[in-house]
Image: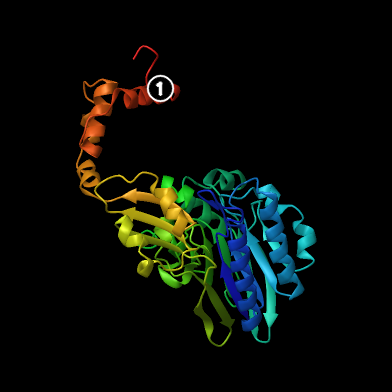
């Protein structure tokens, strides 16, 4: 049997002010084409289906479109919730969906639910684990010593009967690490980047009973510990940290004779994300401009700050997301000891020092008044300062 492994769709996500819904539909249509071409039997969707717990109308319509197309092709779907999803919203209608072979596990109820299938001599059990926290699992196993995420997942698996004669697959959305190394983050995994630590981390060896583990949560595609424990990664680039990622969808072939085979099928976005660096003149020179509709992160090496650089850039690259600088001033800033810079200094002195460091000149009174007004409105200084 053949399966596609997806994760972290983040339907409804925006990139700065740019709506990605059409880009997401484009990549989902590409995945549907791959599913047709490869004659797949099922699709794993490993959480973070939506970008927000209350998804937009456009996001829900896009998921409905994707699931309907898969159902019409009689392709089974195995979908779990992620930390971005609302469990109850994603679980809504799951019983009705199941009649069309769309299986959803969005709310953990103390049981690691599975769906079983047979194809000739190959018998497959597919287990679905929604995103869980230690506190949720502790509620169902009060006699177990559950402190960490690792404890929680191991407890769930320990209390699940797994028939090792069958091929066993797990679809899950958690932060899973190898021995002595963490997975490479992409920069847009909100929970992982805030709280990666011993409490959240799950050792990949807790999945030893499974022939393949379809993971979601990390946006960079990668294996964890062994080839069969894998993050599909997000199908699109959602942050600058993913600019150099080669996005793909794992094609999983499972058979009793040959076990599990994995092939990575490349995905090509409608609009790529690129990071370009150089002077404004170099970057906007006609001979250097390529794929102007891509999403662009630009780093300018000009020594002087360019007025309305974003407006200038967007005349050539309309989907410019962000512009920053890498020059002698920014490199000087990197050497500043932030912990000591504010010692015994007034607000005007701090702002004046910053201005001199950045622009090599003194701030004017008019500019200082603007900074004072902004600082008062933000609550940084009081009216008397």
**Disc 1 secondary structure class:** helix
Q: Quadrant of the N terminus?
A: bottom right
Mark 1 = which residue?
Answer: 373
192 relative to 112, above or below? above
Coordinates of residue 355 in the picture (x, y in percent): 26, 33
Asked whether 241 or 42 is in front, the reply is 241
Say few, some or many: other residues with alpha carbon within 10 Å of mark 1 (under 14 / 14 to 19 / 20 or more): some
Coordinates of residue 197 in the picture (x, y in percent): 39, 48
Can the viewer see residue 364?
yes
Coordinates of residue 105 in the picture (x, y in percent): 66, 58
Residue lying at the far top in this picture: please name it: 384
Coordinates of residue 303 in the picture (x, y in percent): 24, 48
Asked whether 274 or 33 is in front, the reply is 274
105 relative to 228, above or below? above
Query: In the image, 347: left or right of 52?
Result: left
Q: What residue sits 58% from the left and 45% below the top?
A: 136
Can the viewer see residue 210?
no
Query: In the image, 132: left or right of 361?
Result: right
Q: What residue sits 57% from the left and 81% below the top?
A: 253
Q: How many marks?
A: 1
Q: What residue sits 34% from the left and 15% below the top?
A: 385
């Amino acid at each position: 049997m053949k399966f596609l492994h997806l994760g972290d769709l983040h339907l409804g996500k925006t990139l700065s002010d740019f709506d990605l819904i059409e880009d997401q539909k484009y990549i989902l249509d590409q995945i549907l084409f791959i599913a047709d071409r490869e004659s797949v039997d099922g699709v794993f969707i490993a959480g973070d289906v939506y970008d927000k717990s209350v998804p937009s109308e456009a996001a829900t319509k896009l998921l409905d479109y994707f699931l309907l197309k898969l159902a019409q092709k009689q392709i089974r779907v195995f979908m779990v919730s992620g930390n971005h999803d609302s469990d109850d919203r994603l679980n809504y209608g799951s019983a009705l969906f199941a009649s069309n072979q769309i299986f959803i596990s969005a709310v953990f109820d103390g049981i690691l639910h599975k769906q079983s299938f047979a194809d000739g001599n190959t018998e497959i059990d597919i287990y679905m684990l929604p995103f869980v926290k230690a506190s949720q699992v502790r509620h169902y196993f009060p006699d177990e010593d559950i402190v960490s995420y690792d404890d929680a997942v191991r407890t769930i698996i320990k209390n699940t009967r797994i028939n090792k004669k069958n091929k066993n697959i797990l679809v899950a959305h958690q932060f899973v690490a190898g021995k002595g190394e963490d997975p490479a983050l992409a920069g847009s995994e909100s929970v992982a980047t805030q709280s990666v630590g011993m409490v959240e981390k799950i050792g990949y060896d807790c999945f030893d009973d499974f022939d393949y583990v379809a993971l979601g949560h990390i946006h960079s595609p990668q294996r964890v510990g062994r080839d069969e424990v894998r993050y599909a990664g997000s199908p699109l680039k959602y942050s600058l940290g993913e600019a150099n990622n080669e996005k793909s969808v794992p094609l999983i072939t499972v058979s009793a004779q040959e076990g599990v085979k994995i092939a990575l099928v490349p995905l090509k976005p409608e609009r790529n994300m690129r990071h370009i660096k150089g002077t404004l003149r170099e970057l906007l020179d006609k001979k250097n401009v390529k794929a102007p509709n891509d999403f662009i992160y630009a780093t300018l090496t000009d020594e002087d700050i360019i007025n309305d650089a974003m407006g200038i850039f967007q005349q050539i690259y309309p989907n410019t997301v962000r512009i920053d600088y890498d020059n002698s001033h920014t490199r000087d800033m990197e050497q500043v000891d932030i912990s000591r810079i504010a010692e015994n200094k007034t607000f005007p002195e701090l702002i004046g020092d910053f201005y001199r460091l950045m622009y090599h000149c003194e701030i004017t009174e008019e500019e200082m008044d603007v900074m004072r007004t902004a600082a008062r409105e933000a609550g940084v200084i009081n009216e008397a300062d």
